[in-house]
Image (cartoon, rainbow, N blue to C red):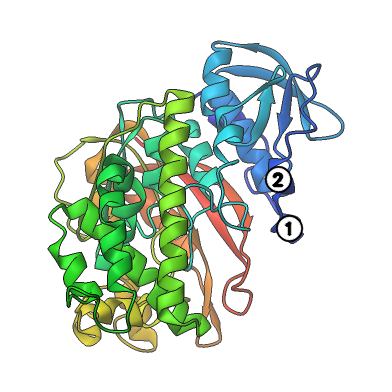
Amino acid sequence: MKDLRNFKGEKMLHRADDINSSFWAYDSENLSKDRQLCLLDNVQFIYELALAQLELQSLGAKFEMTNGLREFSLLGAIDEEKLLKRLAYFKYVRGNPTDYFKIIQNNRTKSVNQYLTHWIYPYKGKFHPQMVRALLNIIGLEPGETVLDPFIGSGTTAVEAELLGVNCIGFDISPLCVLQSRVKTESIDVLPQIIEWKEEIQKAMSLPLFNSAGKTLDEVISSIPGEKEQNFYKMAKMVAISDNARRGREFNNAFLKNLELMFSSVSDYAKIVQKLNLKLGLIDIKTGDSRALPLENESIDGIITSPPYSIALDYVSNDAHALEELGYDLSEIREEFVGVRGKGEKRIDLYNQDIKKSLEEMHRVLKPHRYAAIIIGNAMYLGKEVKTTEFIIDYCEKIGFRLVKNIDKIIFGLYNIMQKENILIFQKI
């Protein structure tokens, strides 16, 4: 990572403009051949501008920003082809579209950040994929190296690492998170086999309870021999259950509609890999505890993660319908989650204890001089602001991390309990 500490603006504030959900962000009509570096149209916030400059620096580019703040003069680069292959916040380099600009054209949703398989399952508190791609660049992860996300959540780190050829190890205490993360990254490996089961699955949905062979949907899914193929259809069912529970949509219609979208999204993934000749990173996602990582000391090249905002979001209650469908007892699984145990001040104490153990584990497994990016925010609880960001900075510095960068980032949709979060970049001393 080059000159990261020299970047101006340790703490960035944002403009609170709403992001339009239309596809203007992917507009290819405005590609100008005479411009050297231009930001994607959906880049609106100061923190994004900060990350865009940091990733240019980290990838060895020398540049100057123009007065319009959307275009840059490229003064030189160690490897311009690398800029085209890796940049997250730029539409093109010297008139040539970046790989990322081509990737985000493959979006079956109305949300800017839900391209390829990112949209699968409505998980609250998701990363922005664009931000994760930039952070992979900023902390200097190269193809073949390994990034760890000990709170893998919806799998955003895994998908973006896979696209950049970076290996990813992910853990989560939630079996629902593990399932969706695997489906998003593994389905591309078995797309032909998944399609082979499509007709049988559709037959199972042709009648409310039984198809002509007398098999229910669950029985057909259980009969699929391959784990990755079976997981794909399990996830399709979870998405439909979520649509029914959250939006009141009829299950069968939701299942069949989302199933088609999932087929299309995985197919898009396979096509873009072939089109861009991508060598995908290796992904290993397992159920596991961030407080006791089953990894050797100093075995990880970088970390990108966001500890659960459990004080702000009750992940067990939020996904209760899906967890129960997977066969889990909510009262039992609640005791295993970080941040949802206890009540009142005790809940905060338990959360802090769990976060301490998780940070110690991150420090243990990270190689010396490498970087950990942690996205976290302060939440309102019992009428008070819980200073989680300050707590993490203080404890990380006590155990041997050095804070390199602290960038403020706005949060949408949680204004009653959280207004911003911080992108913290630490280096292991």
Label 2: which secondary element:
helix
Tell me if residue 429 comes above or below residue 387 in the rendering. above
**Is 21 left or right of 79, judged from the image as shown?**
right
Q: In the rendered image of this protein, does residue 25 appear above or below residue 410?
A: above
Q: To which quarter of the image does residue 310 belong?
A: bottom left
| Front one among 125 and 408 | 125
CB under 8 Å between callouts 2 and 1?
yes
- Which residue is located at x 63 percent, y 58 percent? 110
Residue 409 is marked as: none
- The type of residue carrying mark 1 is Asn
Q: CA distance from mark 2 to mark 1?
A: 9 Å
Q: Residues within 10 Å of mark 2 (few under 14, many from 20)?
A: some
Total residue callouts? 2
Which of the numbered marks, if any, corresponds to residue 20? 1
Mark nearer the N terminus (2 vs 1) = 1
Name above or below for residue 248 compared with residue 96.
Answer: below
Quadrant showing the C terminus: top left
Give the residue type that dot 2 points to: Ala
Q: Position of residue 383 (x, y in %)?
A: 56, 87
Point out residue 296 in the picture as x, y percentages from the top left corner: 14, 41
Per the rendering, the mark at residue 25 is: 2
Q: Position of residue 112 (x, y in %)?
A: 62, 52
Tell me what residue is drawn at x 77 percent, y 59 percent: 17
In the image shown, does 220 or 421 lie closer to the viewer? 220
Tag 1 secondary structure: loop
Viewer-proximal residue among 12 and 208: 208
Q: Is residue 117 visible?
A: no
Q: Is residue 85 visible?
A: yes
